[in-house]
Image (spheres, grey):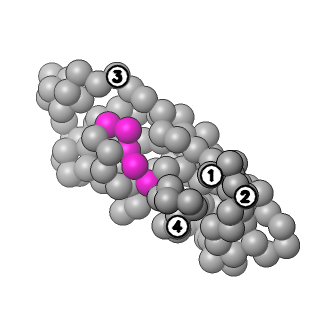
Amino acid sequence: MTKTKIAAASDVSADKVLKTSANGQKMLVAKVGDQYCAIANKCPHLGLPMAKGKFEDGVITCPFHGSKFEVCTGKNVEWVESFVGMPLPGVAKKVMSMGKAPTDAASFTVTQDGEDLFVDA
C-alpha cells in the first residue's frame, strides 16, 4: 500500500462528503467531529456510488437503496431500506436486498500531515 494524498483538510467540511480517489480507488472523505474519515464510494449492495447520498452524524446513506454506513468504520447500520428515497415495507426490503446479507463498506484510515490528508490505498 502507498500513502497517497487525497485532499487538503480545508477542502473537507463537517456537513458533506468530498469525492476523491487514491491509486484508482474511488472514495468519500468527511470530517466527523475532529476526525477525518474515508469510505469507498461504492455501496456493497449493488456497487453503486454513494457520493450523492445524505450525510448526517457521521453516516452516509446510499441514495439508491437506503443502506447506511458509518463513514469512519464502513460499518453497515441499516440494509436496503428504500428504493430511490421511497421507504420499503418488510417484504419488499427482502426482495430488494436480492438475497445479499448486510455488508460493511470498505473504509480507509486517514492521516493528516500539516494541511494535507492521506490514505494508504
Chief secondary structure of the magenta span? Answer: loop
Q: Are marks 2 and 4 in contact (CB under 8 Å)?
A: no
Find the distance from the CA under tag 1 to the CA under tag 3.
26 Å
Whichever of labels 4 and 1 marks the residue nearer the N terminus, that label is 4
Give the residue at mark 3: 101
Image x and y of residue 8, in percent: 69, 75
Determine if the magenta segment contains residue 44: yes
Q: Which mark is residue 121?
A: 1
**Gap in Å between the C-alphas at discs 3 and 2?**
32 Å
Calculate the distance from the C-alpha at mark 4 to the C-alpha at mark 3: 28 Å
Give the amino acid at mark 1. Ala
Residue shown at 70% from the left, 55% from the top: 2
Q: Position of residue 14 (x, y in %)?
A: 61, 65
Vertically, is 114 above or below 32?
A: below
In this picture, residue 7 sits left or right of residue 55: right
Mark closer to the observer (1, 3):
1
Q: Which residue is mark 2?
A: 3
User: Which numbered marker is on residue 20?
Assistant: 4
The residue stretch that appears in magenta: 41-45
Q: Find residue 117 and report its horizontal and vertical position in percent.
A: 72, 66
- Sequence-wise first label, 2 or 4: 2
Amino acid type of disc 4? Thr
Q: Position of residue 24 (x, y in %)?
A: 49, 59
**In what element is the residue under mark 3?**
loop
Between circles 3 and 2, the one closer to the viewer is 2
Front-lying residue, 55 or 18: 18
Depth check: 100 or 4 in front?
A: 4
Label 2 Cα crowd, 10 Å radius (few <14 / some 14-19 / many 20+): some
Q: Mark 1: few, some, or many residues within 10 Å (few <14, many ≥20)?
A: some
Disc 2 marks a residue whose amino acid type is Lys
How far apart, in angstroms, are the residues tagged by discs 2 and 4? 14 Å
Please say if 112 is above or below 80.
below
